[in-house]
Amino acid sequence: MKSAIILHPKNICKEELIHLLTCDGEEEKELFDYTRQLRNHTIGNNVYMRGLIEISNICIKDCLYCGIRKSNLHTKRYSLSDDEILQAARYAWENHYGSVVLQGGERNDAAFILRIEKLLKQIKKLSNHKLGITLSLGEQTEDTYKKWFDAGAHRYLLRIETSNIRLYHKIHPQNNLHDFHTRLNCLRILQKCGYQTGTGVMIGLPFQTTEDLADDLLFLKTLDVDMVGMGPYLEHRETPLWTFRNQLLSQAQRLKLGLHMVSCLRLLMPDINIAATTALQAICPEGREKALEIGANVIMPNITPAINRANYQLYENKPGMDEGAEESTRRLIESVRRSGCEIKPDTWGDSPHWQHRNKSSETIR
Ligand code: 5AD
């Protein structure tokens, strides 16, 4: 590995990526050391926290892998009240998070769109317009994305899930509510609207190959996204993909592959924001810390009121079900330190990639 990649990290080809995704031992260590240093030299060892508020598990989509899919009748549906959401946002503001993420099942009815718009304005107001807001609320029209942007959201997460169109359609129902091109188009619209745009993929899906994952990495680079969140696929018994559970890589292998994906992405895109995702932690308690050690720089502690968490199970054994926001936060700060990074409080933690492209500077309160 030594030479080619280290000297020319920007020109890595697909074959090299496949090799790096599967390397072991000394070579793996070398790769991980390299991408940690690359991150530290390019954007520093700061880690930004986003307080994750899971606002509702009501969803119009029926993704074949997801525990909150519409057809799962075994999930108790909930929607946080405005007060609960604002309280969580206030908690984030008072505890120096710098920004929050509002994430929830996809809905596109007029009442929902209006409600989000109002909530955005209220969150801005309660924080003297200082708290940053990321949305993760699925596919919407350009008009809705614009409305929410104007109301105060400045980052948006919408995972492509896989860049392989055939695989995308295998893991989603065959109807026009679940269309690869629509999703890709949404990402382009988000970029056009001015959002810092984040996407990502699941790693270790049934039918997915290492070649697919190398293509995913190249896809992220071509799309020129500002932020990426990706994590291992985790089987959920109340979903159709559960049938294929015996064809999966072991969870340990999925974790390893997830870490290699983070490391390789840092190599390809040295100045983007990369999240250390909860799905890594679901496999291994130290999963997120390992991702921070090798190149990730964002972490999203769950600040949803604890009583609702058990119902937001995208996958089984999701960690942090039984702890309140304060406990989650305390644990996280400790673990980030252990991974050799430093939490930067009260900061939006905008993607340096986005800043470079827009010649803007970080907003610090
Ligand atoms: N395993 C891992 N990640 C999942 N997601 C949904 N279901 C699963 C699962 N079974 C991820 C998807 C989605 C994000 C909100 O959660 O990538 O975009």
Image (cartoon, rainbow, N blue to C red):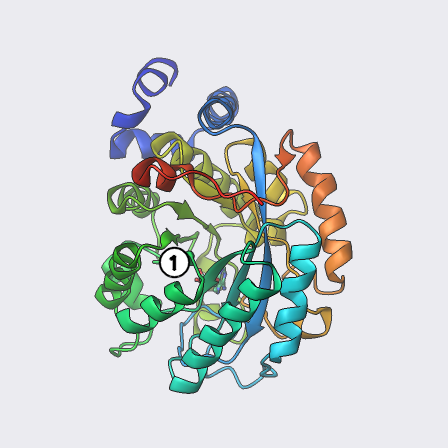
Residue at 60% across, 82% down = 78
**In x, y percent, where is residue 258?**
48, 44
* Quarter of the figure with residue 86: bottom right
In the structure shown, which secondary structural element does the residue marked by tag 1 occupy? Answer: loop
The image quadrant where one finds the N terminus is: top left
Residue at 25% across, 65% down = 180
**In x, y percent, where is residue 159?**
38, 58
Residue furthest to the top in view is 3
Residue at 66% across, 38% down = 336
Residue 256, relative to residue 52: is it above or below? above
**In x, y percent, where is residue 200?**
39, 52
**In x, y percent, where is residue 221?**
29, 41
Residue 317, visible in the rendered structure: no
Residue 34, relative to residue 270: is it above or below? above
* Quarter of the figure with residue 173: bottom left
Q: Which is more toward the observer, 287 or 135? A: 135
Residue kind at label 1, given as amino acid type: Arg
Residue at 48% across, 80% down = 115
Residue 292, visible in the rendered structure: yes
Residue annotated with mark 1 = 159
Asked if ligand 1 lies within 8 A of label 1, the reply is yes
In the rendered view, does 278 fall on the left or right side of 113? Answer: right
Q: Which is more toward the observer, 329 or 349? A: 349
Question: So how many labels did they put on this image?
Answer: 1
